[in-house]
Amino acid sequence: MTVIEDLAVNGGAISPEEALIELGDYIEHLDPAHEDYDKSVVLLMRIAASMWKQQRLSH
C-alpha cells in the first residue's frame, strides 16, 4: 500500500477517468489463451467497477 499512497500523495496518480481507460486497454491486451486470463479479467473488472463506483459517489 505504501507505493500506492506515495503515488497518490506525491504525484504520479492519474485521474479516475484515465485509470478506467487504462484498465480497459490493459484488459484488451491480455492473452485469452493464457491459463489465468479469466481470473485476471475478473479481478481487473472488479477493480474497475470499484473505481467507477467511487468516482460516481464522489460527484
Image (tube, grey):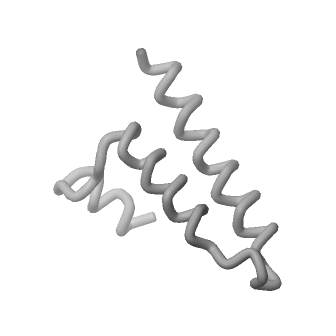
Residue 43 percent across, percent down from the top left:
71, 59
Judge from the rendering whether residue 6 lies leftward or rightward of residue 56; answer left or right: left
**Most foreground residue, 12 or 44:** 44
Percent position of residue 29, x then y: 56, 70
Q: Is 53 located above or below residue 39 in the figure?
A: above
Residue drawn at the location 54% of the way across and 33% of the way down: 52
Q: Is residue 23 left or right of residue 32?
A: left
User: What x and y, as percent, mark residue 1?
Assistant: 45, 64
Compared across the picture, whether 40 is left or right of 54 comes to right
On the picture, is 42 further left or further right than 59? right
> Does residue 26 sit above or below 14 in this rendering?
below
Q: How many marks?
A: 0
State the image coordinates of residue 2 (x, y, percent, origin top left). 38, 66
Residue under the point 48% across and 45% down: 20
Q: Residue at x 52, y 30 (%)?
A: 54
Q: Residue furthest top?
A: 59
Where is the C terminus found, in terms of image quarters?
A: top left
Q: Nearer the viewer, residue 18 or 9?
A: 18
